[in-house]
Amino acid sequence: KDQKEDLGQEVSKKRPREAANYFVAIPVKNDQILDRIEDVQELIFTKEPLLLKTFLPVQTMHITLIVAHLGTEDDIKKAVLALKQSKIKVEALLQGKDFHMRFHGIGQFNDQVLYVNMLEEDKKMLIKITEAVEECFIEMNLDISGSKDFIPHLTFLKFSKAPSLKRRGFRKICSDLYKEFEDSYFGTEVFSQIDLCAMKKKKQESGYYYCECSIHVSSTGMEKNEEQ
C-alpha cells in the first residue's frame, strides 16, 4: 500500500499543473460569525468605499482544505468517493467529541487577503482533518498539486476580486481599516460537514457554491457506523 501511495504522489508531481477547478471545504454557517464579518466589511466600506468589490459574500464563507483539478467526469466521481472515504478517518480523529472551531482576530496574507483567524489548537485539529482528506484524494490518484501548505483561515476580503483597484494606485489593504476588530472574538462553529465544491459551476440559490458532494461528520459517527 505504501508503495502505491508513493507512486500516486510521484504521478501527481510529474503532471503539468492544471488550474484547480474544485475545492474541498468546511462551510461556516454560524450567524454570529457571519454577522461579525459583515460588521468588519461595513467598517472597511465606510473608511474606503472602493474596497466594496473585494468583499466575499458571507453566504460563501468556508475554510478551504484542498484544491483539485478534476478534468473529467470520472475524476469528479473519484473525488466524491475520496471524500466519502475520508469520513471514517475524520470521525476517528474526533474521538467521539464535537470539534468547536473558534474564530478570533483578523489575519492577512501580503496585505492582499483578509481572513478571520482561528485559535492555534483548533488549527492543529484542522490540519489533521485536511491531511486525512488529502490522503484519500492521493490514494485515488487525483491532482491536488495546486493545494498550498495548509494554513486554516476564513477569507472575507480578496484584493484579486477587484483588479481595477491596482490601476487606481491601490497596492495593499492597510491595517487601519480593520484595527477595531483585529483582536475581536467572532464566534464558534461546530464542525459538521465537508463539501466538494465546484469553482466554475453556477452557485446555489443560497449563494453558496455548487456542491458535487457533502459529507456529514458527527462526533458520534463511530458508534453509528458500528450499529449499521
Image (cartoon, rainbow, N blue to C red):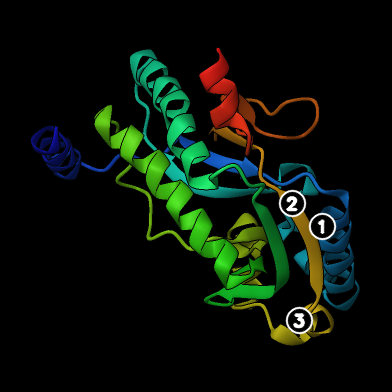
Q: Is residue 193 above or below residue 52?
A: above
Q: How far apart, in angstroms, are the residues tagged by discs 3 and 1?
A: 14 Å
- Label 3 secondary element: loop
Quadrant of the frame with the C terminus:
top right
Residue 33 screen position, x and y as percent? 82, 57
Pointer 1 with pointer 2, Cβ within 8 A: yes
Residue type beneath disc 1 = Ile
**Residue name at image x 78 percent, y 44 percent:** 29
- Identify the residue at image location x=78%, y=85%: 179
- For residue 128, the mark is none
Mark 3 or 1, nearer chain start = 1
Q: Nearer the viewer, mark 2 or mark 3?
A: 2
Q: Is residue 52 visible?
A: no
Q: Going from the N terminus, do you reach mark 2 or mark 3 first?
A: 3
Image coords of residue 96 (percent x, y): 59, 42
**Image depth: mark 1 or mark 2 in front:** 2
Give left or right: position of 48 versus 171: right
Using residue 173 as the reference point, say whether residue 14 is left or right of it.
left
* Tag 3 residue: 183
